[in-house]
Image: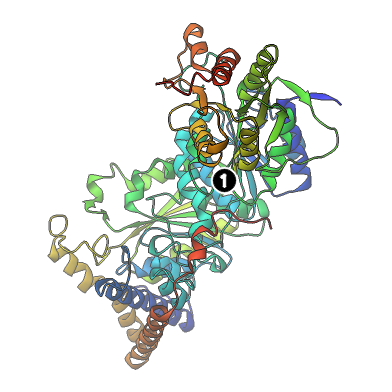
């Protein structure tokens, strides 16, 4: 099968959908001729014109709000939010307006829009361009949240998100844009709320979101060399969350570790770990462990930044301790 | 009052009736609140009726509006039915939003009302987005964004006006200057010249007497027609006054505005009684006819209140419904 980058996968997903549905528009900062600073959308304005691929001023709340209104009145906007850190700027439009409109109107108004943004540290971009803020929006009822790990997920989930009748926020890992993966030539869609078992195992379950799936897979390789068999699960979307697949795995292996690049405090790892603890408690042989970004603003210095994110070595060590039973009596 | 008859008598009577419907709706809502039959809080539109009616009279049903926390007037003016409005205010299943929105989120999609909004200035994006859709879909629609002087402090409004001007969107920003954002006078919250804020974006502006429905309507008709022709956006500053407090519980108001000031507006600048007097003077309607209209409106409201009080609350199963829309 051919391999394309995550960036190309996103571009293909949007192009294919825009050809199919004339109500789809893309809006954001430098999305047209520039194709975004990451060059993800290159070629779109040439094919679809500046009426459908619309450069906006640097006004994140403004263009997000306009997308909400456009979505309520017949268009399907795809908002390009250049950095996930800018979510803080659009919280009212996304969380008070887009997320609640369908509910507040008793089901009469709909907001079929996509916010594409990114996440991920270790790009040496410091504290305001490196955050992974998906937990913020996952907390708000009415928003769906997708976290594609590879080009394959990026394309399939985005196409589904564009067709969804609700606001969907997609977080792409900005360090993965040039990562290649196998992506079919023919059209496919990936459903929201269906996890992918990336590797089967019997001793420990590693749940990894977005690029943390690679941390989990690398940890699994380290463990395999020591005779520990890890099962690796990519939830693909955290809202809706495929709880069944995660629980079934935890019940099978009796040990679970959750890895996510958001801050550890009050985050996605806490949510998934809590669900495992609540619903697979009697199957567990060890406490559920969590690996997330350190609870510090992301530092600039590479010497410091690399310390803030989960590593395969740390995850593997967590799995070993779970296997040895060390966590049972841990303080 | 203008004597130039730019409308026929039917339109005058319709505007008179609509203003009266807002007034009477609000009086009933107030009573429901005072008698503890209405939960939550509400913000009465009484005094500002000419703004909503004068503007909405210039719109087609398919044109969109966005409204504010003080939104009952816009909802009525855009054509909403009393029964479903009162049901919504009381949290009943037959309300426009099945009781899930209430006073501050009332919406009437069929008549183009995209909803009241409880975030001050929060609908600037939605209205501008509706105008973007209208332009993109090419059906000639226009959007009106209603907001109060309080929203002049919100950055979102300026971002949206800038974009609307750049993209020449068919949107009219209707600023209802009732002089008070909550309990603070506009002069303490908005620096400089209010119109200059829109003019800085190259948006054509106009100030009108928001207590004079004909003046409001004449201005709105002009801007709406030009917006439809692709000459938008526009900014309309409407000089108006809310006769009641910021919300129904805002009773002792002397620390922020005097009783004399309130009395002056009520006695000299009541949009409904002044319009009624004008219609009689111009022989468009007799006093008897106007009394008849008022009687009909009051009966309509009483029936609707009775209907809403007797209506059912949504079933418990509805609490988890409508979080997400199902596939079309």
Left or right: A75, with B36 as reference point: right
Say if residue B306 shows up in the picture.
Answer: yes
How crowded pointer 1 is (Cα within 10 Å; few <14, some 14-19, many 20+) is rated as many
- For residue B45, above or below residue B302: above
Q: Nearer the viewer, residue B34 or B317?
A: B317
Residue B51: quarter of image: bottom left
Residue lying farthest to the top in this orientation: A303
- Residue under the image location 69 percent in, 58 percent down: B328
Left or right: A311, with B309 as reference point: right
- Residue under the image location 58 percent in, 12 percent down: A313
- In which quadrant will I find the N terminus of chain B? bottom left
Q: Position of residue B313 (x, y in %)?
A: 44, 72
Q: Position of residue B5 (x, y in %)?
A: 44, 77
Q: Nearer the viewer, residue A178 or A294?
A: A294
Q: Nearer the viewer, residue B87 or B203?
A: B87
Left or right: B182, with A199 as reference point: left
- Residue under the image location 32 percent in, 50 percent down: B150
Q: Which residue is mark 1?
A: A67
Q: Nearer the viewer, residue B168 or A331?
A: A331
Say if residue A235 shows up in the picture.
Answer: no
Q: Position of residue B290 (x, y in %)?
A: 35, 87
The secondary element bearing badge 1 is classed as: helix
Q: Identify the chain of the residue marked 1, using the numbered disc in the image.
A: A
- For residue B305, above or below residue B72: below
Q: Position of residue B276 (x, y in %)?
A: 33, 81
């Amino acid at each position: 099968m051919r391999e394309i980058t995550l960036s190309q996968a996103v571009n293909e997903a949007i192009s294919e959908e825009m050809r199919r549905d004339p109500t789809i528009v893309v809006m954001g900062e430098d999305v047209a001729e520039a194709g975004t600073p990451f060059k993800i959308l290159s070629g779109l304005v040439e094919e679809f014109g500046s009426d459908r691929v619309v450069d906006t001023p640097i006004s994140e709340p403004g263009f997000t709000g306009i997308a909400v209104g456009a979505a309520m009145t017949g268009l399907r906007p795809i908002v390009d939010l250049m950095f996930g850190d800018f979510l803080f700027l659009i919280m009212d439009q996304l969380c008070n307006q887009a997320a609640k409109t369908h509910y507040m109107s008793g089901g009469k108004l709909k907001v079929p829009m996509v916010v594409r943004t990114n996440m991920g540290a270790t790009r040496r971009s410091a504290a305001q361009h490196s955050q992974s803020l998906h937990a913020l929006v996952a907390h708000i009822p009415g928003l769906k949240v997708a976290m594609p790990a590879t080009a394959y997920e990026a394309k399939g989930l985005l196409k589904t998100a564009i067709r969804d009748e609700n606001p969907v926020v997609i977080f792409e890992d900005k360090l993965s844009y040039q990562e290649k993966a196998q992506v079919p030539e023919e059209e496919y869609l990936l459903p929201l709320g269906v996890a992918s078992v990336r590797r089967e195992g019997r001793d420990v379950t590693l749940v990894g979101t977005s690029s943390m799936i690679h941390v989990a897979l690398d940890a699994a390789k380290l463990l395999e060399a020591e005779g520990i068999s890890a099962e690796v699960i990519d939830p693909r979307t955290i809202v809706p969350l495929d709880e069944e697949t995660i629980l079934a795995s935890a019940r099978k292996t009796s040990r679970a570790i959750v890895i996510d690049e958001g801050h550890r405090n009050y985050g996605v790892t806490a949510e998934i770990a809590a669900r495992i603890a609540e619903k697979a408690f009697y199957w567990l042989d060890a406490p559920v462990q969590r690996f997330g970004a350190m609870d510090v603003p992301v530092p600039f210095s590479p010497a410091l930044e690399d310390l803030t994110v989960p590593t395969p070595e740390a995850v593997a060590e967590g799995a070993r301790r779970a296997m040895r039973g060390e966590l049972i009596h841990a303080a | 009052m203008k004597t130039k008859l730019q409308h026929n008598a039917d339109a005058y009577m319709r505007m008179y009736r609509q203003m009266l419907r807002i007034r009477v709706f609000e009086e009933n809502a107030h009573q429901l609140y005072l008698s503890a039959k209405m939960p939550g809080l509400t913000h009465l539109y009484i005094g500002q009726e000419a703004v909503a009616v004068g503007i909405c009279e210039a719109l087609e049903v398919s044109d969109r509006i966005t409204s504010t926390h003080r939104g009952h007037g816009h909802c009525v003016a855009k054509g909403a039915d009393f029964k479903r409005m009162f049901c919504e205010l009381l949290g009943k299943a037959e309300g426009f939003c099945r009781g899930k929105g209430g006073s501050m989120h009332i919406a009437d999609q069929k008549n183009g009302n995209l909803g009241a909004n409880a975030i001050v200035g929060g609908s600037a994006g939605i209205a501008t987005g509706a105008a973007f859709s209208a332009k993109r879909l090419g059906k000639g629609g226009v959007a009106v964004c209603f907001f109060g002087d309080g929203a002049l402090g919100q950055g979102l409004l300026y971002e949206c006006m800038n974009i609307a001007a750049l993209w020449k969107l068919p949107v009219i920003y209707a600023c209802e200057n009732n002089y008070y954002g909550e309990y603070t006078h506009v002069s303490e919250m908005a620096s400089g010249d209010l119109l200059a804020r829109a003019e800085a974006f190259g948006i054509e502006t106009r100030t009108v007497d928001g207590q004079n429905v004909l003046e409001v309507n004449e201005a709105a008709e002009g801007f709406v027609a030009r917006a439809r022709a692709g000459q938008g956006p526009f900014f309309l500053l409407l000089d108006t006054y809310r006769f009641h407090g910021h919300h129904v519980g805002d009773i002792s108001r002397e620390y922020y505005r005097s009783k004399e000031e309130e009395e002056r507006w009520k006695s000299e600048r009541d949009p409904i009684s002044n319009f009624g007097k004008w219609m009689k003077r111009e022989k468009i309607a007799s006093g008897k006819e106007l009394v008849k209209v008022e009687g009909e409106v009051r009966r309509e409201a009483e029936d609707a209140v009775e209907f809403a009080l007797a209506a059912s609350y949504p079933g418990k199963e509805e609490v988890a419904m409508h979080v997400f829309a199902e596939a079309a």
